[in-house]
Amino acid sequence: MADDREVLREVWEGRLPVAFSLSSDEVSVMEQPEPYYLLVPRQSYLTLVTDKVQKHFKTYTDPDKVGEVWFEYEGQPLKWHIPIGVLFDLYSFSSTLPWKITLHFQNFPDEELLGCRSKEAIESHFMACVKEADCLKHRSQVINGMQKKDHKQLWMGLQNDKFDQFWAINRRLMEHTGDEPFRNIPFRIYQVDKSYIQSLFRPVTDDGEPLTLGDLLKENLPDIIPKIDACVTQVIIQGVEPPLDTPIQWLSEHLSHPDNFLHICVLHETDDR
Amino acid sequence: MADGVDDQSTPVEKDEPQSPGPSSPVPSEKKKIDLLLKAAGDAPIMKKKKWAVDPSKKIGWVMEFIRKYIKCEPNQSLFLYVNQSFSPAPDQEIGNVFECFGSDGKLILHYCKSQAWG
Amino acid sequence: MADAVGWKRNLRKQLRQRNRVECEYFKELINNHNKIFEGVDSMRTQNVALQIQVERLKQENLDLNLKSETSSSGNGGGGKASNEKIQSLEQKLFKLQEELTEMHRRKGENAQQLIDVSHELQEKEKLLTSKDTKLTETLFQLDSLRNEMKHLEDSIIEKETAYQLLRDEHQALQLACTSAEEKLRVAKEENTELITRWMELKGKQAEFLNFDNEEYHKKQRAKLKQDLKEAAETHVDIKQPKIRPQRSGSQSMQICYQAIIPTHAHYKFDAHDGEVNAVRFTLSGRICATGGADRKIKLWEYGNGQLILKGSLMGSNAGVMCVDFDSQEHHVLGASNDFASRVWSIADHRLRHTLTGHSGKVLAAKFFGDASKVVSGSHDRTLKVWDLRSKACIRTIFAGSSCNDLVTSEAAGSTIISGHFDKKVRFFDTRSDTCGNEITLQGRVTSLDLSPDRTMLLSSTREDSLKVIDLRMNQVISTCCADGFHVGNDYSRAVFSPDGQYTLAGSQDGSVFIWNTATGKLETRLMKEHHSSVVAVAWQPSGAMVISCDRTKKAILWSDI
């Protein structure tokens, strides 16, 4: 069990080196400002960890035109409400580090991105995800049994990057009593240029045999296994490629993001790669 | 989702040899989903509660629809709840939500103008 | 076990690898970068601060330079001479400066004075303007007060004239009043005089009337004696309807030998506004009277096949329930719902007598005796006999039940026969105080009629039949009834034909029925003319025509033509 906790810590410790730069269209001073380098937690959200970056770049742009901040990678607007690690794995898994993200203060793409006016918006989104996940896992019984301050502690743990603080509460959400697994695995499968897939998936067969990551993928993307075998498709969770025989219950307990969802990125090899 | 996959399994597999690229179920002629919209708290009720909706529509689209229907100003807040417990993400597809939380062939969504649950 | 944890080991390895590649490689670098960034930032702010300091120092330097220049310019020449010169110059300068200060001082004083003066001036001006405004205000007030005064004066004058006018009027009115009072006094005197005269005349008239009555009685008695004598002498059996000897004086009496059963509505007319409660012909058949709920009695004259209105007799305060003529056809009698009976003269349509005393509606009234008496039957369960000469009720008979109709029969010895609400027909003899006889029928009695030969009495009852009673035997000898015949009211009337052969009555449904008196067989039913209950009927004494009246204004004359 100790090494399982080690896994949790390794997952939590995941950081990404990011080089933020201001969109050149929006620079209002003579020279292009230098990029701002930052190590951002994979588990966190872009708008939650970039206060300093935003403050830095605001001095280089026309203050009259400053609107809501948004991020973009190679022309792809990045959704703040998806954990940073998932965004990286989905859009730039095999690109060279540091990850180059462009910052915008103008022309917010309402069509593609949700507005994020405050930290409360992030918090309520995060809590909604946790609740949805618990709804799938325990029919909301665990999350409803918690107190308001427990919810707050979860959020503060994530916001302040405190592993112990977070897991003191999250442990209860990830528990399964005895041999009884989760009712359903809260997961989302992302593919580039598609909406994500979310469906009901029980972690064991009717006979009680544990099911694996491979079973889950087969169920949701029937033609994926041969593609993985042919190395044209990669399945990435938390920046790693878990073996397909990994039990899905274990994966959910250990490799889920703080929002309690198992975010699975399915990358298809394209011609230019 | 399982049904949908079964329906489309044949064309997908046929395509595969030609284009090994991403080929997921085509959301062409999917059955519409019955949506039941219920008011909670102080929100005005809708005359028509039951709506058949394309499963590929997003939750955000439903929220905009409700806003328009009950004449909720953009500066007023509107909350949508599944299972009376959590708010679905606005970019979530209705099909997904129905798949996970629908019952009796329909998806029940509660809406209100002040935070009702959690 | 090892197999089972293969995936786990793999995963841990991958995670470690991930963290190494993504994080540890960059950790130091980025930390350093951040430090440098912060360093640069702090440097930048420091730089700005320093630049500001430099600017300030530069400014200070410039100032110092300027100062030193001015001070150094004086240090041009050398030597004592120049020193002395300088001293004298300095003294001069000092003097001049003193002068200058003096001037300045004076100038200042002057300026101060100037300022003080101008201040004063300003104050004065202010005072002046305030005074001015006050003045204009006062003037304005004065003006308005004057106006007001004028107004008040005007109104006083107006009031005075009005007062004068009123006083004049008052005087005139007082004069008029005194003259009117005078007139009133004169009129009163006249009135008393007239009353005394009238009383005298009245007394005289009464005397005369008494005398007349006595004469008349004497004559009557003589005639009666004569008649009795004649009757004793001759044994003539007269079959035709008897004519009462008392009524021999009546004008052009029509004698009917054979009544004709009418078949058609011959003439229809609206007799009254509302119910027509009573109808009756004179013995001559010339005049017909109707009484209605419109409080009038109307007199109609027959001619050219129709009835022509001769006059309306007013005076009744409620609906008229019964009408009767005296045998001389001088008077008409009406019984009214206003508890009174009234007598009018036919010739001039004037109200002659009002007989009050009943405490209920009067439903029937008949002339009686030689038309100097009237008997009336009322809802107050009494019958009253009135003497028209003394205009007094001379007898009250307590019948015991509401009287709906009555007939008088001189032939039967001044008998009054009354029909009552308690289903009884009662017989009273006016000469004795005793109640003679009574016959009980099956229903409330609504009307009574005597046959021309006075031997039969026709009574109509609410059990929808007419009973013919033989007065000699006091027995019902025949009953007239028919399908559809319903007696509609407590005062629905039925009559004999002038020859006594038929009986006639109206029904609730508006039809008029005629039966054979002897057999009780229905002779005819006259239908579809009246649209409401038929209340009263009468057979014209010549026997040729029948009149019927209903509850909605209508009266119809029926004949066989």
Image (cartoon, rainbow, N blue to C red):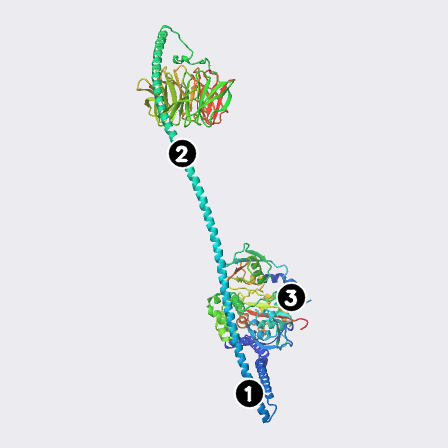
From the viewer's perspective, tell me whether residue A4 is left or right of residue C373.
Answer: right
User: Which class describes the residues within 10 Å of circle 1: few (<14), some (14-19), or many (20+)?
Assistant: few
Please report, as a chain letter, where disc 1 is located.
C
Of residues A165 and C147, which is closer to you in this image?
C147
State the separation of the CA atoms marked 2 and 1.
124 Å
What's under tag 2, amino acid-wise?
Answer: Leu
Measured along the vertical axis of the image, is residue C82 above or below residue B85? Answer: below
Direction left: furthest residue: C433
Q: Which marked residue is nearer to the observer: mark 3 or mark 2?
A: 2
**Which disc number belongs to residue B23?**
3
Say which residue label 1 marks: C91
Q: Which marked residue is nearer to the observer: mark 2 or mark 1?
A: 1
State the separation of the CA atoms marked 1 and 3.
110 Å
Mark 2 or mark 1, earlier in chain = 1
**Could you confirm whether marks 3 and 2 are on the same chain?**
no
What's under tag 1, amino acid-wise?
Answer: Gln
| Secondary structure under the numbered disc 3 in the rendered image | loop
When asked about the image quadrant of residue B35, the answer is bottom right
User: Which class describes the residues within 10 Å of circle 2: few (<14), some (14-19), or many (20+)?
Assistant: few
Percent across and percent down for residue C260 are 48, 16
Measured along the vertical axis of the image, is residue A46 above or below residue C225? Answer: below
State the separation of the CA atoms marked 3 and 2.
128 Å
**Which disc number belongs to residue C175?**
2
